[in-house]
Image (tube, coloured by chain):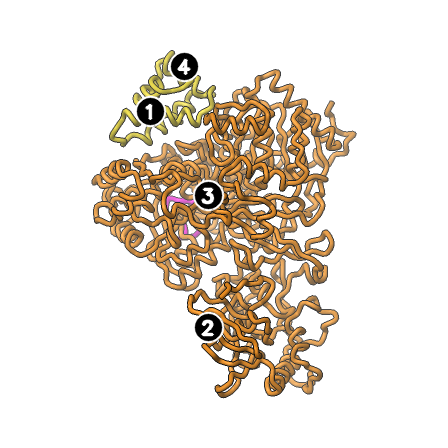
Chain colours: A yellow, B orange
């Protein structure tokens, strides 16, 4: 899938949790959302983008969430 | 005292009473106990005594004009009208005496003296209350001839496509006028003139040109042949009827399909319909002719390429071809390369077997439904906050509301029968708040209704509004803390409270963003929080945004914070667009959920279905519709089974959708018509109309209602049978003999449906889930003692402006919606005479924006967005605000979704249909897309009409 599309979608998820006071929980929830609603190939692609290609364009908290909590 | 069991087949003459006080009286030597407040006529009917009547019917308040229902009451003088005289303790009533008989005969004689005596050739012969009453009162002669002045030469009004108005047969009983007022709430009819000149008038216009919305309430109420369906005039009176459920909007009206053999003569709203109580709208009541329209395709078709003509084939060949193609694709491209889409126009049973096919046979969870593009945020948002992906109330609950708050919904157009009920409550005095960028009819264009507050916000700012309302409620001390402490997660409440209390969430701080006077926002918030029982009703104006799910959660936050949930009159009420949006979601047609909203990763649930279905199931969520299309566009998704849905017309960014379909190798469409998606298909399975199959629909209030077959499927099979045939061809037989057996399986595997069966539906008429051992008769109101998730959970709703920004190139915002006479993509309603009201989609534009562009009423205007361009006619109106334009998407050639974009809700990918930045300018010709569409669709239609030998499928 077009990685730009995935970046945009993941950042939108991150935006929802922007104002959560506990950002540690927020990161779990961001990754939890991806785990529950994104198909595995989409998760693998975004994980590779973060872990291998550096994750440019993804909000930092989304990158952190993906690195720490994404199930692939 | 036993509770009175009302028989829907009896007309009690006047409405029942909700009084708890009981009154005992005697009528014709029969002692009867009834609720205080009912009329003598009503009590008599309960006792089995039918008092003659003409102007009375139990759907309307008593009027007392016809003078047929007079009775004698011992100890009282005169002959009171039994319809307007309430019961009283101990009174003794006589309904049949020699004096009463004289009076009634005399009255009937006068009626008949100005009525044509053409009973034998009249369309209502045998179904006429005037005829019945003439018999009941023993009328044997009419002493007055026709020499004097009379109304027999009055001219018929046949302007309405569905019914005629013949004033020569009118007895001026006012039932039609009162039905228009009380039942429908449109007030289109009146009695003009006095005395002999009195006549029913649609505002001195023809019915078609008048304010009449063609709901049929007047026709239903008419006791003579004055207002009568044209189909009855043509076909004669029906000889049997079958109760079924409308296939249009999410209200889910119950109808009696009145039949002659296998021909529908008319559809009349069922008096005991749980959702509609005998009312209807122009679509359900009259617009069912599509079921037999000449455009229907009833023979399966296949072809190798969309550039080829279709080849008509037998069912076996079509099924086997589809199965072989799906198998080939999975072998060639992998199991993930195929999937399916169900529709909210499908029955529960059809959706269930389709998702079963995809999960158990395709071996993937790539199943989605059209709720993706409408109410998927409702499913997500309400599950997160309240614990269940469904509305919390019954429709009837609105009659207990003190405050009605409508956000992003247009009930009079989208959910007209419920809107009539809502209007009744509003006329009784309930307060009304409307948040909508556009001036919907309920703002100020409905008789005797005016919104207390219209929050005319800018499109895309719903979350800002919700936060501002919450800010007022929190900072002005309007939170019901005792409720929150008892019923909700306190920590989540504190986080939310502290968030919304921030100054940046105040109405003043957000005023520029919202475009709404902050004091009006404050007043609306105070009214919602303190005005008594307050209910929120919302629609796609909430969900079809990049923050649709956030708004849904924000709405639930408001309801919890103000304790407006868990009883009659309050709640969170998503108004579902199509008939079975709720049901299609309930039935597990989302890629991450099994039936009953249980995640595919839940081991226990998966094991349950694996055992029942005998196949291993994937624990990974599948692709959503937009994901499928994206993957197809890149060549990774090659096969689609699309049941009853038309993604080309209804999904955003049409050219993106069609590009994806063109990239697929096997698109299977199952539908009544060669819809827009079918033009890109390789296999066409003809579908059955709702009149040709058994099943159930679940409406917006979780009401499961029966769909019953009244005629043989013209395509040969009910739709679930087609799906099971495909499954069998793929090596997995599903040996159901009847749709009821599918529901039995659903009930066995889905806790909220555990108590549902066709037998129960036949007995009860309908039932609202959860229906289980604990609630065998269903659950009208949810979350009464505790939320389904235990404690209600508040979510912080940070406003994030959409990325779909206006700029110098695209300075206007386009928002889309629906209109009363058309339904969704219009595949059904465009094939009925409803086109008399809406023959084309038009663009509403504010006078200021029109003047700036030199646009005049009726001009062709080009609408250009970042996604595409189309051309529509302009309608200049102040209903839309400056900077906002509006259109509908009921006609494919309009290309409304050519201009909508791929932007979507953060949680669900529900498209942002309601916000598209556009430019509008005068043009003189169709857009390039429209020209291409015309050529392409004409070719495709011709392909479907080709004879088999001309096809090129090998």
| Category of crowding for the residue at label 1, using alpha-carbon neighbours closer than 10 angstroms: few (below 14), some (14–19), many (at least 20) | some
Q: Secondary structure at mark 3?
A: strand
Alpha carbon distance from label 2 to label 4: 77 Å
Q: Quadrant of the C terminus of chain B?
A: top right
Alpha carbon distance from label 3 to label 2: 54 Å
- Apparent side of residue B1 relative to residue A63 in the rendered image (left or right): right
- Residue at the spot x=63%, y=58% of the render? B161
Q: State whether residue B466 is above or below residue B399.
A: above
Range of magenta residues:
B876-887
Q: Earlier in the sequence, mark 3 or mark 2?
A: 2
Q: Determine if marks 4 and 3 fall on one subunit.
A: no
Q: Residue B23 got which mark? A: 2
Alpha carbon distance from label 1 to label 4: 19 Å
- Residue at the spot x=54%, y=67% of the render? B58
Outermost residue on the right side: it is B949
Q: Which residue is mark 4?
A: A48
Alpha carbon distance from label 4 to label 3: 38 Å
Q: Residue B816 got which mark? A: 3
- Apparent side of residue B807 relative to residue B485 in the rendered image (left or right): right
How far from the left and from the top, in percent, is residue B149? 64, 83
Q: Label 2 marks which chain's residue?
A: B
Query: Can residue B436 be seen by looking at this rendering?
Result: no
Q: Which residue is mark 1?
A: A28
Quadrant of residue B317 within the rendered picture:
top right
Q: Label 4 marks which chain's residue?
A: A
Which of the two residues, B764 or B435, is positioned nearer the viewer here?
Answer: B764
How far from the left and from the top, in percent, is residue A11? 35, 26
Q: Determine if marks 2 and 4 fall on one subunit.
A: no
Q: Label 3 marks which chain's residue?
A: B
Which of the two residues, B728 or B282, is positioned nearer the viewer here?
Answer: B728
């Amino acid at each position: 899938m077009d990685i730009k599309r995935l970046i945009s979608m993941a950042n939108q998820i991150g935006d929802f949790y922007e104002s959560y006071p506990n950002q540690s929980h927020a990161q779990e929830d961001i990754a939890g959302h991806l785990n529950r609603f994104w198909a595995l190939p989409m998760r693998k692609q975004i994980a590779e983008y973060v872990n291998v290609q550096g994750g440019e364009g993804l909000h930092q908290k989304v990158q952190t969430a993906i690195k720490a909590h994404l199930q692939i | 005292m036993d509770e009175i069991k009302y028989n829907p087949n009896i007309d009690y003459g006047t409405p029942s009473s909700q009084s708890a006080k009981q009154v005992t009286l005697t009528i014709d030597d029969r002692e009867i106990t009834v609720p205080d407040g009912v009329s003598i006529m009503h009590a008599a009917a309960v006792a089995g005594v039918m008092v003659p009547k003409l102007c009375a019917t139990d759907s309307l308040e008593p009027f007392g004009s016809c003078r047929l229902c007079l009775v004698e009451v011992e100890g009282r003088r005169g002959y009171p009208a039994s319809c307007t005289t309430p019961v009283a303790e101990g009174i003794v009533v006589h309904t049949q005496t020699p004096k009463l008989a004289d009076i009634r005969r005399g009255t009937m004689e006068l009626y008949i003296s100005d009525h044509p005596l053409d009973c034998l050739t009249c369309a209502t012969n045998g179904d006429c209350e005037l005829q019945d009453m003439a018999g009941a009162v023993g009328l044997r002669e009419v002493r007055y001839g026709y020499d004097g002045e009379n109304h027999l030469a009055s001219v018929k009004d046949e302007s309405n496509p569905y019914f005629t108005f013949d004033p020569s047969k009118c007895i001026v009983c006012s039932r039609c006028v009162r039905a228009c007022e009380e039942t429908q709430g449109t007030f289109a009819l009146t009695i003009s003139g006095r005395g002999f000149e009195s006549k029913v008038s649609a505002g001195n216009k023809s019915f078609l040109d008048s304010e009449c919305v063609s709901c049929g309430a007047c026709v239903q109420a008419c006791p003579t042949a004055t207002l009568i369906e044209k189909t009855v005039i043509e076909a004669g009176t029906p000889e049997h009827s079958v109760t079924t459920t409308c296939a249009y909007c999410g209200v889910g009206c119950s109808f009696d399909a009145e039949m002659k053999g296998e021909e529908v003569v008319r559809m009349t709203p069922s008096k005991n319909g749980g959702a509609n109580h005998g009312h209807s709208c122009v679509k359900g009541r009259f617009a069912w002719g599509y079921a037999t329209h000449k455009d229907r395709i009833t023979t399966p078709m296949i072809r190798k390429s969309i550039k080829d003509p279709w080849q008509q084939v037998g069912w076996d060949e079509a099924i086997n071809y589809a199965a072989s193609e799906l198998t080939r694709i999975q072998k060639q491209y992998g199991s993930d390369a195929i999937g399916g889409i169900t529709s909210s126009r499908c029955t529960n049973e059809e959706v269930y077997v389709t998702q079963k096919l995809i999960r158990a046979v395709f071996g993937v969870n790539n199943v989605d439904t059209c709720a993706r593009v409408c109410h998927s945020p409702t499913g997500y948002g309400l599950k997160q906050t309240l614990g269940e992906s469904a509305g919390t109330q019954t429709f009837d609950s609105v009659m207990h509301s003190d405050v009605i708050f409508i956000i992003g919904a247009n009930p009079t157009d989208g959910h007209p029968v419920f809107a009539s009920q809502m209007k009744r409550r509003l006329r009784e005095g309930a307060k009304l708040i409307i948040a909508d960028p556009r001036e919907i009819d309920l703002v100020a264009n409905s008789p005797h209704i005016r919104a207390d507050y219209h929050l005319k916000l800018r499109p895309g700012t719903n979350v800002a509004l919700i936060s501002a309302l919450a800010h007022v409620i929190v900072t002005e001390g309007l939170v019901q803390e005792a409720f929150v402490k008892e019923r909700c997660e306190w920590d989540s409440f504190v986080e939310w409270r502290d968030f919304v209390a921030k100054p940046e969430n105040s109405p003043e701080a957000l005023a520029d963003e919202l475009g709404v006077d902050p004091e009006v926002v404050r007043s609306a918030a105070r009214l919602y929080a303190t005005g008594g029982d307050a209910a929120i009703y919302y629609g796609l104006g909430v969900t079809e945004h990049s923050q649709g799910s956030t708004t849904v959660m924000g709405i639930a936050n408001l309801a919890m914070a103000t304790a407006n949930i868990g009883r009659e009159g309050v709640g969170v009420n998503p108004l579902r667009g199509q008939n079975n949006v709720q049901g299609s979601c309930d039935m597990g047609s989302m890629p991450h959920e099994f039936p009953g909203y249980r995640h595919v990763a839940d081991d226990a649930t998966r094991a349950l279905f694996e055992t029942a279905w005998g196949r291993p199931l994937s624990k990974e969520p599948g692709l959503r519709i937009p994901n499928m299309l994206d993957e197809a566009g890149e060549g990774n998704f090659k096969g689609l089974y699309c049941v009853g849905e038309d993604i080309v017309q209804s999904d955003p960014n049409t050219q993106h959708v069609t590009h994806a379909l063109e990239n697929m190798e096997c698109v299977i469409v199952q539908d009544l018509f060669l819809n827009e998606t079918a033009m890109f298909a390789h296999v066409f399975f003809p579908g059955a109309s709702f009149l040709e199959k058994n099943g159930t629909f679940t409406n917006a209030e979780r009401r499961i209602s029966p769909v019953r077959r009244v005629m043989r499927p013209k395509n040969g099979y009910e739709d679930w049978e087609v799906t099971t045939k495909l499954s069998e061809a793929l090596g997995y037989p599903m040996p159901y003999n009847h749709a009821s057996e599918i529901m039995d399986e659903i009930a066995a595997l889905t806790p909220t449906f555990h108590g549902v069966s066709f037998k129960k539906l036949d007995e009860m008429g309908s039932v609202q889930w959860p229906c289980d051992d604990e609630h065998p008769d269903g659950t009208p109101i949810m979350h009464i003692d505790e939320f389904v998730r235990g404690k209600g959970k508040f979510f912080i709703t940070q406003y994030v402006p959409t990325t779909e920004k206006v700029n110098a190139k695209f300075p206007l915002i386009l928002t889309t919606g629906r209109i009363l006479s058309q339904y969704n993509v219009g595949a059904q309603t465009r094939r009925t005479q409803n086109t008399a009201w809406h023959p084309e989609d038009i663009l509403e534009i504010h006078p200021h924006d029109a003047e700036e562009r030199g646009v005049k009423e009726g001009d062709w205007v080009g609408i250009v967005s970042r996604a595409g361009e189309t051309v529509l006619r302009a309608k200049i109106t102040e209903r839309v605000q400056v900077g906002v334009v509006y259109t509908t998407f009921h006609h494919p050639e309009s290309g409304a979704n050519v201009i909508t974009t791929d932007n979507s809700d953060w949680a669900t990918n529900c498209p942002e249909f309601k916000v598209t930045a556009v430019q509008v300018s005068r043009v003189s010709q169709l857009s390039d897309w429209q020209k291409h569409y015309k050529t392409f669709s004409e070719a495709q239609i011709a392909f479907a009409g080709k004879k088999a030998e001309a096809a090129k499928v090998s």
